[in-house]
Amino acid sequence: MRFLRFKHSSSVPEKLESIVAKGFERLSKSLARGSNTQVHGNRSTTSTTASNNGKRQSSRRGTHDSDRRVPHDLRLDHGNGRYGFFRPSSQPMEFDSIAKSSTLYQGTLDAPGQFQYTTLQVPGQSDIPKLQHKLSRVLFSPGVHYLQDPRTQVYNFNPYLQDIMPVDQFDFDAISTFVTASKDETLTALAQANGLKYYASTSSMTGALSQLHFLLSNFRPVSLLDFSRQQPETLGKMTKGARLPATMILRNRNGCYAIDSDKSSDREIVLSLLGHSLERFLTKTPQEYELYKKRPQERMEKIKEVNTYHYAKSGPFLMRSQLDCHDDRLLGTGTFDLKTRAVAAVRHDLAHAEKNLTGYSIVKTKGRFESFERELLELSRSTMLKYSLQARIGNMDGIFIAYHNISKMFGFQYLPLSKMDEILHSFGLPAIDYMDQKRSLNDTVENLSTKMANEEFILSLEIWDKVLSYITNELPNTSFRLIMHTVPISKFESKLRVIATRISDEEVETLQKSGEKLQKLLANASTEEHSEIVRYHVKEIMKLNQSLRHSPVGIEVQVKSTINDIVIRERHPVFEHMDDCWKVGVKLTQMNTAQAIEVYNTCLSEKMNILMNQTLLKTDEDASSLMKVLRLLGENRMHEDKNTTATAKGKVIWNDE
């Protein structure tokens, strides 16, 4: 309960004094009855947490629901009750009902165990690019940075950054192409030299690690405490797209396995291509960047580009991470990722935005629409998990984000990995009492969140190793396609479903080329033709998926967390002190063939449905309410920009040197 300072001061209205007095009176009566009533404003709720937790609560320093880092609205009654952090003692766990005789593997894992993260030094690496246009000051100044102040129209950075080169004018043949893990000779040799069984790039690992995050955290929501009340979300639930099944291909290479992304359901058109273009835009001088522009009358020679990688191992895994940018003044290695983030009007209405460039802009820091806050909120609930995993795999300090609407740049933000950890892993963390003399100064939200993220990363690799060990024994000396999808069992438990199907090298090429073929068809077709092309592609891919379903091997993975050797009753595992010890009981059970086929079909159908929805161009009549609002805001802003341009007298630059 909030404490009202100067309660008896004459400056406090009499009516307010009366309300406060009644609140204290109700609290005193409830305490006298021995209940656990918690008062929130003018509403009270009765907690049964103490009786439900028993021994667990007393050993966990008496925490209860109201102490959790949760939005206020979630602590109040909503229909069937509050969010519910603690599992009632009367509710058994399905994990406990699985008999040892029916498990493929049963054991307890902890971090780091034998999965210590170790950097591998590879000589001959090229220099890592640096930010240009004086953008490096964003790295050392928290918060968002407007490219142009919307009130005074003064530019905080070079106005050259505002207008983005159209995708069709950028010569993508001039840049170096991405090398998959299975075709990277250095990565293959490094895996064999170090006796490592699996090797992959970050892009092919993050899907699997995301599913393992959902399993270990039991779909922990992201923390929304830093966002204003102007956002309608009261729970930071991950988006449907972020929770999609992960699919990948493990190619056998003389007893080692290269993990490649499954590209059959990719739709990388404008946003993916633009990401490659903007990466050069931010790390090259204007003169250097102009060299990438297509020149129809001239034969463009390929610009010499060399990718720089970070290599690390953990257990039997070798991980390769491309290094986008570097600054010596940052902590640790000084490296960070470059990410370009399209505004909501583009992401929620991609097919329309590709046909008709939107005028939707970011003109304020907070707010439900046209704000940096909304973009960060949606980023937190969708791809931030993937970004944080990429940064952790590459031992990076954080990510640099450039916000745009395909044609125009709006601003920049730097998110250290520690901040992403706090957003992704602090939901449910007890409120910290800094007056508690037993609490260490290191027991901060930031440190506890990072500890959770680090240990979850190692535990994820340990569980994945157990899964892959079983599958490679069932499908020896062959390549296979892997599908991973975590689903909830109940409010307090989840399970990971894994399907593996044998696949030949010829079938791999057919599958991967189907995705590449789609990209080329879409790139050379008008926007109106995209829907029909994707419909045909989805139909063909579904046929291909059925032909590749060779006696699938299916397993389920369930976990049970203990902290300090006590089974948690919390809905999501949390640390209260930096010396807390997290262990995870793991059980693997086998699916029958019918179950494996059903999961195989369901998971791949989900990915095809998302592909269709992204491509379907909706008319104004068919568009959702959100799409209509975003389109209207874009049209209004485009009209305003035309008037502003017509009356503009010149560009003013802050601190121009």
Image (cartoon, grey):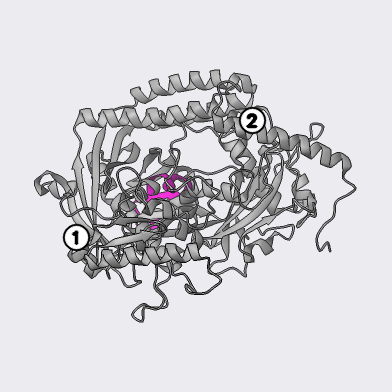
Q: Is residue 461 left or right of residue 186?
A: left
- Please name the residue shown 55% across and 30% down the image: 625
Tell which of 9 and 152 is nearer to you.
Answer: 9
The residue nearer to you, when weighing 307 against 102, is 102
- The image's mark for residue 51 is 1
Answer with left or right where residue 649 lies relative to residue 327: right
- Amino acid beneath label 2: Glu
For residue 252, say whether it is visible: yes
Which is more toward the observer, 302 or 635? 635
Tell me where residue 274 sits by quadrant.
top right
Give the quadrant of residue 245: top left
Q: Which residue is mark 2?
A: 354
Is residue 205 located in the magenta-colored stretch of the structure? yes
Residue 25 is situated, as x and y percent measured from the top left of the image, at 34, 66
Image quarter where the N terminus lies is: bottom left
Q: Which mark is residue 187?
A: none
In the image, the segment drawn in magenta is: 193-209
Q: Residue at x 76, y 56 (%)?
A: 157
> Which one is nearer the viewer's eye here, 215 or 231?
231
**289 lies left or right of 51:** right
Q: CA distance from mark 2 to mark 1?
A: 56 Å
Figure label count? 2
Tell me residue 599's x, y (percent). Answer: 29, 32
- Residue 165 colored in magenta in the image: no
